[in-house]
Amino acid sequence: MQRVTTPGGPRTPARAAALLAAAVTVTALCAADVLARSYPFGPRTRSVNDLGNQYVPFHAHLWDLLHGRADGGLLINWQSGYGTSFLPDLGTYLGSPYALLVAVFPRDRIDLAVYVVTGLKTASAAAAMAWLLLTLRPGRWWAAGLLGASYALCGWSVADASYNPMWLDGLIALPLLCLVGERAIAGRGRLPGVLVVALAWTANFYTAYMATLGAALVLLLRLLLIRPPRRQALAAAGRAALTVTLGVGLAAPLVTVIWFGTRHAYPGRVRQFAPVPAEDVAARLLPATYGFGSPALYVGALALLLALALPFHRAVPVRVRAGWTALVLAVALSLQWGPTHLVWHAFATPQGSGYRQAFVLCGLLVLAAWHALAYGPPGPRALGAATALLVLIIAVAARSELVRPYTWPVLGLAVTGALAGLVLLGRAGRRAGPAALAVVLLLGAQLGETAATSAVATKLRLGHLDDYEPWGPRQERQAAAVARADDWPRYRTDPGRAQTVGNDPMLVGGQGAAYYSSLTPDVLSRTLTALGGGWTSRGRSVQSLDNAVTDVVFSVGARVHSPPDPHQKYLPPDGTPVTVGRQDVPPPVTVRPTAATGSFGPSPYRNQELLLGSRVYTVPRLTVHDDDGRPVRTRRVGTGTAAAKPAITAVCPAGTQVQLWAPHFSGTARLAGTGAPAAVFRFEHPRNRAAMEPLGRTPASGRVRVELTPSRPGRVPAGAVGCLDTGRLHTAAARLKATGATRVTVSDGVVRAELPAGSKGVAVVAAPRIAGWRCAAGDGPARPAEQYHGLIAVPLDAGATRLTCTFHPPGLRLGTTVGAAALGALVLLTAFSAVRRRRTTAPPTPTSPRERVTTAS
């Protein structure tokens, strides 16, 4: 392995390069947000898609945990989904050590905290890559700094990972894992390498897996180029494999929990990979382009020109030119082939963008660019060939719709600056003036090009993805209302149906049904769907259900009612204040006379009654009419159909509360003649399912007319209307309360309840029966919890007056065992290596004069 040797020591240039790379990265990111007028430098929100829905709320929950204010702990999150496993979410979204930095920010600046963490991660990736470049081959430290920033600010980073901050840990991991490979080649101690692998896989195992594959390819190429004896090559590969194995083993307690969490998660939608056209791939190499489903391969004009010049740079050894060029081309082709696409994504096509491994190719382009520059700036011949290839790429990309008009001026200025800087650098020789001017040209071109590209991505994301307002007055009012009403675990306080983000309970407090994660439990999603709940993200973002029956079942004694979020364009503001509705509900642990009988059917009203244990609904026959009053037998409604202004008619008992369940309807529904506000339904196949909504009270005549205003074609089911008898519901709630637990205590992963004397039948805990719950009644042994229509159920022995349920995340025991074994093996190997080194370097034992004489004779 070649090292940089300077009077300041081998690491001085690497440190300078790392600092420069980090500084350029932070400057470009902030400049881009200033140009885009994006938070925190402008009025535009940056909380798009999963950033607002998942990452900011999860970091808010982490803040609460670190400050002792969260309901739950590392094992159970009692705030979301009526009680969900938190350790898989911690490993998926919050495993990075950078996440802990949110604790030093105020709670109401959580968006700023996530922004700072995102910038620090990106800067760290730049620094790590700059260090790697100078480790692979000596060269100009400032050039390594610029190329390190090119990698950190690649298209994948600014367009995709900037709103998926957990992926940025993979961006950091790739150069670090390549450095681990260099240590394996040099035969240096394995302990630092094992710790790096463990940290990378703990921070975000998904992108760490991709980074590990990329680093393995780099290691194989390095061995081919260095050409050590076969025994040494095999030893280096073995050391690297052992290092990765031990590192992944140390991360196993979290990795196995995540893996089992995905097995029990709602499956969502299964996608088949389809490669994008070549013109779109070429377009994403250029600045100021954007496309959600295409590989974001932009690395800047400087890095791209150098990578294209490498095959023609005669100062670079042929094997180096051929090896790095072949590796870049092979990985580029692997992005577009189905089998290798599955290998990159751990054999499961993502539900979102299918090119999440693109950062590996960006890293390889930068590594190839470094080798083109480290052997000396490419000459006119190589730069001419690179320019010709770039023109060919531009010609192919020009046919893509991803290229916007403003791409061309940004590209022209960037290429001009990069070419001028490289030509000037090649002619400068040892003259400081021309070299300094070349640095200024290259730095200025890179900063301007990257800032423009990031700003364009920020603006275009707002038009393509859902966006959410950062923390402000709305969340403050919601949080204050929740705090005033909260009395967990006596009852739950739901932050409400009119949500601000998909994880409102984590953001503003309370203990609601809403929950959005890649690990949303299958049992939670299916249970709430059967009860009339709605969801987005194909079932993985379950929503709160504003329904009195389910509030009784899940012990929701307080419910926040907020006006529609004005930031969401489909929900017009109505000016109503934030209020809290209260309901007398049983405790979270109730006693049912018998085990669950029957199963859920197609009607959510009957399913609610099955879970409640009482009949409280009338489900009348209904008729759907078009705007001329004619019946619509298909019950299909929507713009552009015969039923342009439809209505639903039915007959309900007077005074009952009218509920409308129309999961495949999108638009608004209003109960005529009552003055009640219209309810909003959102359906979009296969992404969104509309939730059941209350419409108001039935008039004295009993005739119900629901006026619909569809926003797109949909369908009203046969049993869409349910008439809730609130008197019967109050009676059922009082009965469950009378026989329910007299005292309930809840800690991280433990629920304890004291039951009335003589309780018999089945104790039901108002929480989804996710895998990992074990319960014991009285002094009996703990057994896996049973189910009561999706909830935790425990058969009661005669005379049992106590109930204890404990939660152990599936996979934690296996992961702990593997982690302990990896730790033990690491300790033994480290000790063995230390003893062997001591014996090898120990001085020879001196002999006495008498011994020397005896030996001589």
Image: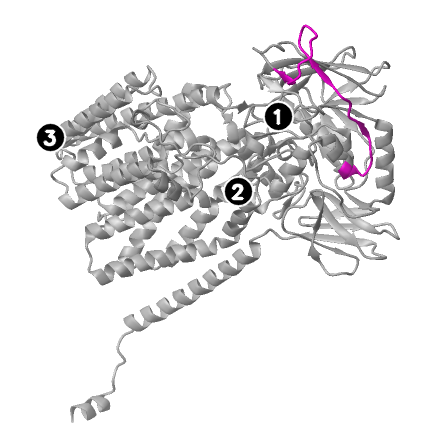
Amino acid type, label 1: Thr
Q: CA distance from mark 2 to mark 1?
A: 25 Å
Disc nearer the start of the sequence (2/1): 2
Report the span colored magenta.
Answer: 610-637
User: In this rendering, does residue 680 appear at all?
Assistant: yes
Mark 3 to mark 2 CA distance (whole Å): 51 Å
Question: Which of marks 3 and 1 precedes in the sequence?
Answer: 3
| 125 relative to 499 in the view: left or right | left
Q: Which residue is mark 2?
A: 100
Q: Between disc 3 and disc 2, whose residue precedes?
A: 2
For the stretch drawn in magenta, what is the main secondary structure?
loop
Find out whether the residues at labels 1 and 3 contact each other: C-beta distance under 8 Å: no
Residue on which disc 1 sits: 500
Q: Nearer the viewer, residue 288 or 345?
A: 345
Identify residue type, mark 2.
Answer: Leu
**Residues at discs 3 and 2 in contact (Cβ within 8 Å):** no
Classify mark 1: helix, strand or loop: loop
- Which numbered disc covers residue 381? 3
Question: Residue visible at 66% across and 44% down?
Answer: 72
Left or right position of 684 against 594: left
Q: Is residue 780 left or right of residue 194?
A: right
**Residue name at image x 56 percent, y 41 percent:** 519
Label annotation for residue 778: none
Judging from the image, what secondary structure is the residue with disc 3 in? helix
Whether residue 687 appears in magenta in the rendering, the answer is: no
**x, y (%) of residue 246?**
42, 58
* Marks 1 and 3, how far apart at CA: 58 Å
